[in-house]
Amino acid sequence: MAQTNITTHNRIPRQFQRAAQSIINWIPIAIVIGFWELASGTVVANDVLPSPIIVAFEVNDLIISGDIYSHLFISIYRFAIGIGLSISIGVLLGISMARSKPIENFFDVFLSILYPIPKVALVPLAMLWLGVGTGPAILVVFLACLLPIILNSYNAAENVDQNLIWSAKMMGTDGWELLQKVVIPATIPNILTGIRQAIPIAFIALVSAELIASYEGIGYLILEAGQVGNYQVMFANIVIISVVAYLFVTGFEMLREKVIVWV
């Protein structure tokens, strides 16, 4: 019976399998939107919680008018710089800690102290150091993404198959060449997983920083609309940044699948 089910599954065209999986993936979103529609005007006044249809029209208006693009570009720029810095430093530091005990001992206490601190709590301090604008947002994104990338890089480098390392050393590979040809390729899948985990964290940190320490960006638009009671615009901006974050995550997952196959 199990063999029959496997055979039947294999006979289904791949396109239909993907379409069915896509539908299943969107069911939770549909449920949330349904509850949102029911709550608007009943549980919560519709001027405070606009219906999804009203928000969808507002999203359309923002896109057509083009008013949001400059702010969206600024937010994406801050996201890219912040997560790019965290990847560059986090991967290097994580692998170095795994391969060198003195480096691990040096940074271990610092990371243990930094890890439980809510990164949004650092925004006022970042404002004192860097003023209001792009600097604090990049710093908060960088700090928020740094730890998951370091931890995944560290665990990946620490758990590299020792047989691979011993075999490489027996063939005369050592030092930087060993790191380049054996350790780094073996850690790529887990490093990519850490980056995948960091992307949504980066957007959370970005919007949080822009809510407090910026006069530009999607977070600022959300705060500005909320302060004047324009809740449909506020929700529209929330939807837009959520969709952008989803596109970044989905695009990175597609890239990761190709890279892992290549590795």
Image (spheres, rainbow, N blue to C red):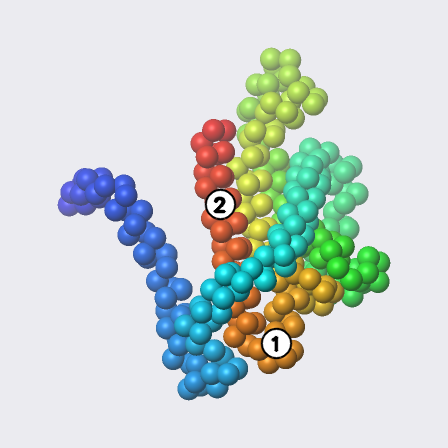
Residue 85: x and y, percent?
70, 44
| Residue for point 52% across, 37% down | 189
Q: Based on the displayed image, in which of its 4 quarters is residue 38 positioned?
A: bottom left
Q: Which residue is mark 2?
A: 251
As shown in the figure, which amino acid type bears the numbered disc 2? Gly
Q: Which residue is mark 1?
A: 226
Secondary structure type for disc 2: helix
Q: Which residue lies most toward the front here?
A: 65
The mark nearer the N terminus, 2 or 1, is 1
Residue 214 appears anywhere in the view? yes
Q: Nearer the viewer, residue 53 or 174?
A: 53
| Residue for point 32% across, 57% down | 24
Residue 232: x and y, percent?
52, 75
| Residue for point 71% across, 68% down | 212
Q: Is residue 106 depicted above or below 38 in this figure?
A: above
Q: Is residue 111 depicted above or below 224 in this figure?
A: above
Q: Which residue lies most toward the right here?
A: 129
Q: Is residue 242 depicted above or below 2 in this figure?
A: below
Residue 250: x and y, percent?
47, 48
User: Dot 2, how many residues are within 10 Å of its Cα: few (below 14), some (14-19), or many (20+)?
Assistant: few
User: How far is the residue under mark 2 from the one under mark 1?
Assistant: 31 Å
Q: What quarter of the picture does the N terminus occupy? A: top left
Residue 240 appears anywhere in the view? no
Left or right of residue 252, residue 99 in this image: right
Q: Is residue 54 depicted above or below 153 in this figure?
A: below
Q: Nearer the viewer, residue 5 or 99?
A: 5
Secondary structure type for disc 1: helix
Disc marking residue 60? none
| Residue for point 34% across, 53% down | 22
Left or right of residue 65, residue 14 in this image: left
As shown in the figure, which amino acid type bears the numbered disc 1? Gly
